[in-house]
Image: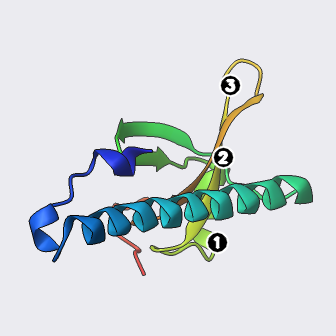
Amino acid sequence: IALDRIPVASSAFPSLAQCEYFKHFRRLIAWERVGMNQAAMAEITAMGNSQGIGLDKEQCLLPYLTLQASGESALQLSLSDIRAGDVVFIQACSPSSGTIVAEHLAVVTSINSPSGSSVAG
C-alpha cells in the first residue's frame, strides 16, 4: 500500500508504541476505504446499463487525469449534474475493440465548459 511509503515522525508521538499504533490503524482505515471503493464499483458494474459520457484522455500527470469531451459528449456533460467534488466511476476502454480494460473511482476537481471557463461547484 502506498501509504506505507509516507514517513511518520515518531518524535511527534509520546512513545514509539503510540507511533506504531497510529501507523497500524492508518493502514486499517486505508484498506477499509479500498474495500468500500471496490464494493461501490462492483455495485455500479452489477447495475449495468448506467448512463455514461464518452471522454477522451487529454493529459495524465499522476495523480491527475484530464479528460476532454467533444461533440455529443460535450453536450451531455454540460447538461449533467456533475460538479467538483463528485465521485465518478471511470471505465477505460480499448480504442480498437471498445472493451473495458480498467475501472476506477475518481474525484472530479473541476469541469471546464467549451469556452474554457471553469464550472467547478
- Viewer-proximal residue among 7 and 83: 7
Q: Quadrant of residue 8?
A: bottom left
Crowding at label 2, few (<14), some or many (≥20) Cα neighbours within 10 Å?
Answer: some
Q: Amino acid at mark 2?
A: Gly
**How many numbered discs, if any?**
3
The quarter in which the C terminus is drawn is: bottom left
* 3D distance between C-alphas at marks 3 and 2: 13 Å
Q: Quadrant of the N terminus?
A: top left
Please identify the quarter of the rendering in which residue 18 is found. Answer: bottom left
Q: Residue at x 62, y 77 (%)?
A: 81
Compare marks 1 and 3 and give the one earlier in the sequence: 1
Residue holding disc 3: 94
Amino acid at pointer 1: Ser
Identified at 68% across, 25% down, the residue is 94
Q: Would you say residue 112 is visible in this rendering? A: no
Viewer-proximal residue among 72 and 100: 100
Q: Is residue 34 left or right of residue 18?
A: right
In front: 109, or 35? Answer: 35
- Whichever of labels 3 and 2 marks the residue nearer the N terminus, that label is 2
Q: Is residue 105 above or below residue 98?
A: below
Give residue 30's position: percent from left, percent from top.
49, 61
**Residue matched to label 1:** 80
Residue 54, label in figure: 2
Q: Depth-wise, is mark 3 or mark 2 nearer the camera?
A: 3
Query: Given contact means CB atoms under 8 Å apart, are the residues at marks 3 and 2 in contact?
Result: no
Residue 41 in the image: state x and y as whole percent. Answer: 73, 56
Task: Decide which of tag 2 and tag 1 comes sooner along the chain.
Answer: 2
Secondary structure under badge 1?
loop
Q: Is residue 77 visible?
A: yes
Residue at image x 14%, y 61%? 9
Is 60 drawn above or below residue 82 in the view shown?
above
